[in-house]
């Protein structure tokens, strides 16, 4: 595996001519540009040191860490409940799924089992969050494609409704802190259910609208079909998970292959792409939104009244040991590895950040393509810097 | 001098008030017959040049400032309409319905610090915005805004128009290269490639109009349109509109300043009023280009009932609405696909259009004097043929031409080694 | 053929052109706020507070500072503490609501406001005087019985503290006794 | 369902290919000798009965007297998972063989562990700091790292 270009005394143009026979055909010098950390479409403070031959990318080195807040270190001196507030801020457009993955890990560690109703509420919240996260991803991907913020605004309009639902659930819109080890904090209020039903009724129409807006658009198709193809072998080898892996055509969804909470009681399809190009990565998110809606609908039908929180002490002291719990997050396999030494704070708190690991393939995907493609590919990976840098 | 004033109601009044005398009695004294005493102007005979200079300056001043007001209103309109397309409100804080937003913008830009980067070429850097704005305004010199309302009706009007609008490629390139910024460089280089490429199909598309009108003068072209040339030249119209949006770097061809790719492209480093000039040039380009399109293809200022100026403005703003609509819908075309679209798609279609139009003129037109005239039935037949040709050729070319370009082949050694499953 | 997909997209944007904008002009118009909204200012019932500082201990950021001295003795409740300092530094608060969850006597609630912007950081520290003087608009986060009474802090404003007492049932037990003035649960819910 | 392979079973299944590599097992975990990690992983990946083709995550834990590096592996074809652990002693220069050659997904994760925990991975082609900047003193996720340098 080659990352970077090694040390070479040859002038840069010569070096690239040797590495990429097609490059530097004119008498020109490679240009190195820092795309980011202040750039409109790097999705946060993210830097790509890119070497160009004209518009063609010869080499990319992603550089990050600008948003590194040391969450893993901070968690070591906070109680298990307090850590939930830290997980909110990891992938800040998908707080619910972060909460969910963390409380699953802590429950595994402490040997707690949440009541049924809590699990249903968690699944409903997580699937709504997945829709919200995919809406953000789709909107920003289309914005990166140059569709002047219009699809983004449409996506935000629907995301707003989901945030309203979250406000009903837990009083916050972004940093939710809704789930607790052993359940959820509070049962849904009575006005949540009609609002959720209304949303479920409206949303498919809006997804149709997104499809009509740009899915068939010739410009979009020409720009994304066949660009930055990720093969299944490569994806698996690079630990790529989530919509990116499924877009490559591999039906790997932890909700199906390793069902947690109540996913074994709902029926849904796993959409897969064909080619693994940018178009499939864009399209698969629209398809997954529909499936998420199906899951929420079934959960609303199945949910029964009951307690929403298992009895547990206010200060949780799990027995010494370790646990790794993972869920299918909106961006891929979201895992938490917790080590307990029997005290009130986790001894080690480790996050398997899907967008961090999905970034591994960025370099291989964009070399040889053009500047504009790189931006779109980055958008299609759907990174979130809060999660990448932690 | 007389050639300039013929049919020009915008300037004649002032000119005659200043310089009416025996020599120009034909134009200046209504109801004048040979032998009658002519009206007398302020200036003595022999000072017509001064009268002409004053008249031209006043007319240019008026037109320019009215146009700037219009452009200001247009920036407001564009932001407002894009807001509505995006299901939001748009600027609504300054003044009633936010109408004073452009004024606020202008004040903001004027009071901002104008930064010149260290690595910039100061001369070129300062010159570029001026070059950009000036070329945009020069278009106004030949546009007929209404019946008899124009600054100059030169007999090579269309050629002048094309020549002047191509200068903005130079301005953009100057800005891009002089900034000493790599994003600006990308923008500048893209500008040269794209703006020059789209000149070609654009020029080819107006050849059809020329053949039909038989004149390069824009006033003559308007007068020649008994039927709007949109009907007779749908293919030319399509190519011209696409080419024009590429020339103005409007979406979907805004690759020069593609904000998601190269930050702000060629004007990345500009601030304050220098940025304001680019901004002004870009927005006013929509109005001037819409004016040109209205003149060439939509009957110009002609129209029933309403005054000619109103018709012209209506057409301009109608076209501007379409440009805004397109901007709020379409994603950006990649630069190499933009180029491929110009050379592989628009250029052959432009040639086809010229060929078809010329053939139709030969077959359907009756020779009269130097040119040919058409019967009404002939014109409708021509429109029918051309619409069919347009749809057919676009459909055929969509199948024939692929705009996709493959990636640069990358040897495996340069990428990560991937073991099979 | 090129153009058909573009046209279908343009129809969608035109359709949205005639829709009502979904954004609101903030200071004049406001989005409806759910009573559970975890707002910026805090609501504190001094009568119920014993100065145990559970909230301070549970705060993930440690932004609550409490200083007490032994207060009076009432025959029914025994010794109590009087609060000297109750500083909440909302400049660093992330409104997670863990302090509210921790309070064993239901003396502290999240508020409902969100317009606490100040020019100086030190103005963002809510002191005990401000807490005493503040209008009581508790969020129903952690107040299921308020929820049941359809209490809306933005509409109903102040609330007598007796009504904000801890609900009479342990929240984790499956059987939930009927709280006073509460609607039956399960009605209309799945 | 993904079946977690207990440590004992996993030890039995790699016994033949890598004799002496296993240190101990407990529950679902299997400890291997740190210098044999690459060899064991190679076997886990290439053996047709095991086929661990997806490396979920690599984590490192600082137990003060030793570092423990944890590999979570999954096989997408056999639908089973395993937890592989390796204990590295010494605080000066703890070293493990890199598995980047087997799974590209280990690239950033190993760099992250080197950056934050200070466990070096031999054979990693580009073992640089990833979240912190070059020249940052120390490895902040270690338990004895008390405060950031001024």
Image (spheres, grey):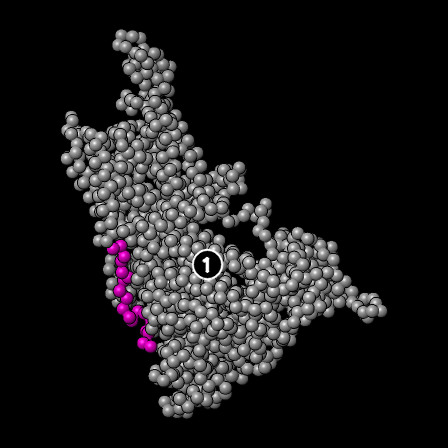
- In the image, is residue B156 above or below residue C148? above
Q: Residue D125: within the magenta?
A: no
Res D139 seen here: no
Give residue B227's quadrant in the image: top left
Residue occupying image coordinates x 37% and y 59% = A376
Which quadrant of the rendered structure holds the C terminus of chain D? bottom right
For disc 1, the neighbor class at 10 Å (few under 14, some 14 to 19, many from 20) is many
- In the image, is residue B323 above or below residue A233? above
Magenta span of residues = B402-421
Give residue C70's quadrant in the image: bottom right
Of residues C106 and A345, the one nearer the viewer is C106
The answer to whether residue C74 is left or right of residue B284 is right
Q: Residue B409: within the magenta?
A: yes
Give residue B161's quadrant in the image: top left
Give the residue at mark 1. A136
- In the image, is residue B17 above or below residue D134? above
- In the image, is residue D96 above or below residue B411? below
Residue occupying image coordinates x 32% and y 48% = B191
The answer to whether residue A281 is left or right of residue C126 is left
Which quadrant of the rendered structure holds the N terminus of chain D? bottom left
Residue occupying image coordinates x 23% and y 50% = B397
Q: Tell me where residue B120 appears, x and y as whole percent.
A: 39, 49
Badge 1 marks a residue whose secondary structure is helix
Q: Tell me where residue A301 appears, x and y as whole percent.
A: 52, 66
Of residues A149 and B318, the one nearer the viewer is B318
Q: Tell me where residue A240 appears, x and y as whole percent.
A: 40, 70
Mark 1 belongs to which subunit?
A
Res C13 seen here: yes
Of residues A331 and D4, the one nearer the viewer is D4
Q: Tell me where residue A201 appears, x and y as whole percent.
A: 48, 57
């Amino acid at each position: 595996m080659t990352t970077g270009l090694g040390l070479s005394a040859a002038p840069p143009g010569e070096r690239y001519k040797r590495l990429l026979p097609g490059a530097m055909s004119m008498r020109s010098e490679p240009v190195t540009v820092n795309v980011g950390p202040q750039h409109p479409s790097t999705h946060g403070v993210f830097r790509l040191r890119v070497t160009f031959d004209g518009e063609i990318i010869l080499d990319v080195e992603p550089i990050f860490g600008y948003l590194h807040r040391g969450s893993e270190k901070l968690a070591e001196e906070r109680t298990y409940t307090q850590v939930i507030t830290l997980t909110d801020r990891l992938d800040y457009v998908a707080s619910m799924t972060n909460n969910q993955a963390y409380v699953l890990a802590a429950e595994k560690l402490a040997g707690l089992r949440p009541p049924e109703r809590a699990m249903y509420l968690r699944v409903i919240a997580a699937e709504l969050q997945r829709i919200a996260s995919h809406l953000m991803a789709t909107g920003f991907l289309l914005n990166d494609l140059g569709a002047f913020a219009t699809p983004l605004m449409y996506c935000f309009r629907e995301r707003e409704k989901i945030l309203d639902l979250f406000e009903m659930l837990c009083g916050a819109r972004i940093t939710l802190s809704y789930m607790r080890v052993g359940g959820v904090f509070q049962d849904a209020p009575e006005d949540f259910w009609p609002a959720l039903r209304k949303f479920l009724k409206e949303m498919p129409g809006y997804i149709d609208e997104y499809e009509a807006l740009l899915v068939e658009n010739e410009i979009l198709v020409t720009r994304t079909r066949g660009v930055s193809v990720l093969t299944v072998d490569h994806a698996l080898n690079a630990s790529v998970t989530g919509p990116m892996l499924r877009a490559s055509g591999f039906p790997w969804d932890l909700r199906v292959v390793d069902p947690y909470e109540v996913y074994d009681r709902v029926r849904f399809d796993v959409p897969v792409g064909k080619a693994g190009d940018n178009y499939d990565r864009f399209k698969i998110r629209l398809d997954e939104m529909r499936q998420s809606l199906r899951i929420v609908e079934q959960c609303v039908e199945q949910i029964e009244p009951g307690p929403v929180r298992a009895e547990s002490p206010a200060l949780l002291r799990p027995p010494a040991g370790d646990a790794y719990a993972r869920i299918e997050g909106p961006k891929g396999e979201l895992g938490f590895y917790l080590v307990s030494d029997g005290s009130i704070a986790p001894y080690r708190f480790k996050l398997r950040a899907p967008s961090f690991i999905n970034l591994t393939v960025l370099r291989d995907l964009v070399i040889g393509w053009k500047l504009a493609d790189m931006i779109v590919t980055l958008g299609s990976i759907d990174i979130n810097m809060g999660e990448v840098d932690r | 001098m007389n050639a300039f004033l013929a049919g020009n109601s915008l300037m004649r009044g002032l000119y005659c008030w200043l310089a009416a005398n025996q020599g120009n009695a034909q134009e200046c004294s209504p109801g004048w017959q040979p032998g009658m005493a002519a009206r007398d102007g302020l200036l003595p005979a022999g000072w017509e040049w001064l009268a002409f200079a004053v008249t031209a300056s006043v007319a240019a001043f008026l037109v320019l400032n009215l146009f700037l007001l219009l452009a200001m209103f247009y920036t407001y309109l564009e932001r407002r309409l894009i807001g509505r397309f995006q299901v939001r409100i748009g600027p609504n804080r300054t003044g009633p319905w936010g109408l004073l937003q452009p004024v606020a913008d202008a004040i903001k830009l004027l009071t901002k610090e104008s930064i010149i980067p260290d690595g910039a070429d100061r001369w070129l850097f300062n010159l570029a915005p001026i070059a950009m704005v000036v070329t945009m305004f020069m278009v106004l010199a030949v546009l007929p805004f209404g019946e008899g309302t124009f600054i100059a009706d030169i007999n090579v009007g269309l050629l002048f128009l094309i020549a002047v609008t191509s200068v903005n490629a130079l301005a953009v390139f100057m800005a891009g290269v002089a900034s000493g910024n790599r994003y600006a460089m990308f923008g500048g280089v893209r500008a040269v490639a794209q703006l020059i490429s789209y000149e070609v199909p654009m020029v080819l598309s107006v050849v059809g109009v020329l053949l039909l009108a038989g004149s390069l003068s824009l006033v003559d072209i308007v007068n020649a349109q008994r039927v709007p040339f949109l009907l007779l030249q749908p293919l030319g119209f399509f190519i011209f509109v696409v080419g024009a949006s590429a020339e103005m770097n409007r979406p979907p061809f805004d690759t020069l300043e593609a904000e998601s790719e190269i930050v702000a492209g060629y004007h990345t480093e500009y601030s304050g009023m220098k940025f304001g000039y680019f901004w002004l040039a870009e927005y006013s380009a929509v109005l001037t280009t819409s004016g040109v399109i209205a003149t060439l293809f939509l009957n110009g200022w002609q129209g029933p009932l309403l005054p000619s100026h109103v018709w012209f403005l209506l057409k301009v703003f109608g076209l501007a609405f379409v440009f805004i609509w397109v901007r709020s819908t379409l994603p950006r075309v990649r630069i190499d696909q933009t180029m491929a679209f110009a050379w592989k798609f628009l250029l052959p279609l432009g040639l086809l259009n010229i060929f078809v139009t010329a053939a139709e003129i030969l077959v359907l037109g009756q020779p009269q004097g130097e040119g040919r005239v058409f019967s009404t039935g002939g014109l409708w037949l021509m429109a029918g043929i051309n619409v069919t040709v347009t749809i057919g050729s676009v459909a055929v070319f969509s199948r024939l031409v692929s705009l996709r370009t493959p990636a640069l082949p990358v040897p495996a050694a340069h990428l990560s080694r991937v073991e099979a499953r | 053929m090129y153009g058909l997909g573009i046209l279908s997209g343009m129809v969608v944007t035109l359709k949205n052109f005639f829709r009502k904008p979904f954004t609101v002009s903030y200071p004049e118009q406001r989005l409806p706020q759910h009573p559970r909204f975890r707002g910026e200012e805090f609501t504190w019932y001094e009568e119920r507070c014993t100065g145990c500082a559970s909230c301070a201990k549970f705060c993930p950021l440690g932004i609550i500072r409490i200083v007490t001295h032994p207060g009076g003795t009432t025959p029914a409740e025994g010794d109590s503490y009087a609060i000297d300092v109750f500083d909440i530094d909302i400049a660093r608060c992330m409104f997670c609501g863990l302090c509210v969850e921790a309070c064993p006597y239901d003396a502290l609630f999240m508020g409902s406001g969100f317009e606490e912007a100040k020019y100086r950081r030190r103005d963002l520290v809510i002191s005990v005087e401000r807490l005493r003087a503040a209008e009581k608009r508790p969020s129903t986060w952690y107040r299921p019985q308020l929820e049941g009474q359809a209490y809306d802090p933005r509409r109903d404003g102040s609330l007598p503290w007796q009504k904000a007492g801890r609900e009479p049932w342990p929240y984790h037990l499956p059987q939930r006794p009927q709280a006073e003035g509460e609607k039956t649960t399960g009605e209309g819910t799945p | 369902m993904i079946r977690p392979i207990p440590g004992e079973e996993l030890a039995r299944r790699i016994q033949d290919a890598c004799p002496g590599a296993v240190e101990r097992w407990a529950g679902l975990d299997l400890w291997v000798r740190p210098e044999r990690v690459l060899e064991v992983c190679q076997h886990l990946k290439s053996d047709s009965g095991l086929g661990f083709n997806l490396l979920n995550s690599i984590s490192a834990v600082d137990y003060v007297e030793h570092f423990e590096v944890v590999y979570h592996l999954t096989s997408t074809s056999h639908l089973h998972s395993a937890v592989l652990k390796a204990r590295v002693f010494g605080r000066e220069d703890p070293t493990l063989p890199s598995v980047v050659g087997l799974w590209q997904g280990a690239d950033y994760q190993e760099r992250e562990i080197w950056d934050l925990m200070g466990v070096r991975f031999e054979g990693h082609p580009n073992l640089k700091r990833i979240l912190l900047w070059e020249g940052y003193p120390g490895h902040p996720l270690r338990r004895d790292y008390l405060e950031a340098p001024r």
